[in-house]
Image (cartoon, rainbow, N blue to C red):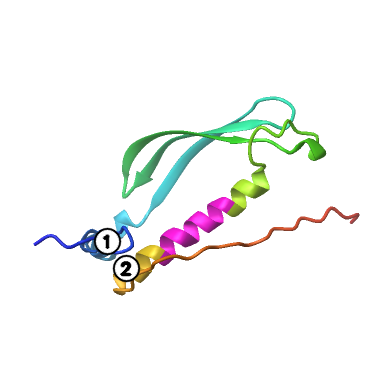
Amino acid sequence: MKTEPMNGIDVPALKAFVDSVENYPDRRTVGFRVTTEWKGQTKSVGKVSSYLLGGEEFSRDFEIHADEPFELLGGNTAPNPQELLIAALNACLSVGYSANAAAMGLSCTSWKLNPKGDWICADS
């Protein structure tokens, strides 16, 4: 019997993964491989190549562009590193909230994260 995903999550598959990690400690390690190359001025490109899960490597192929806005001496061609960091943290929380809610039988209809990040440059 196939169950419908909850919050887009295959709950039986999630529970099987959790059981696997609990029963086999060597599967608890996840490693990510990203190489970043400076492209001049304030631009850089991160290349996601693979990740390791339980000792097995899985290929990936993504690029993550970063740049600063004009006012911070950049070319304004991509989000800046701080914006990418906030987006990455939001995405991490989104996965956690959605998966945990699904595992508990809670259906999410909508939600939004809207944090702010302030960086202050000051003399020491």
Left or right, 65 with respect to 9, comes to right
In reply to whether residue 88 is colored magenta, the answer given is: yes
Q: Quadrant of residue 44?
A: top right
- Range shown magenta: 87-97
Report the quarter where the N terminus lies: bottom left
Left or right, 33 with respect to 7, comes to right
Q: What's under tag 1, amino acid-wise?
A: Leu
Q: Badge 2 is on which residue?
A: 102
Q: Secondary structure at mark 2?
A: helix
Please report contact status of discs 2 and 1: CB closer than 8 Å, yes or no.
Answer: yes
Report the quarter where the C terminus lies: bottom right
Q: What's under tag 2, amino acid-wise?
A: Ala
Residue at the spot 60% in from the left edge and 46% down from the top edge: 84
Left or right, 67 with respect to 13, comes to right
Q: Nearer the viewer, mark 2 or mark 1?
A: 2
Q: Nearer the viewer, residue 61 or 109?
A: 109
Residue at the spot 71% in from the left edge and 25% down from the top edge: 40
> What is the crowding at mark 1: few (fewer than 14 residues within 10 Å), some, or many (at least 20)?
some
Residue 14 is labelled as: 1
Return the residue found at the far right.
123
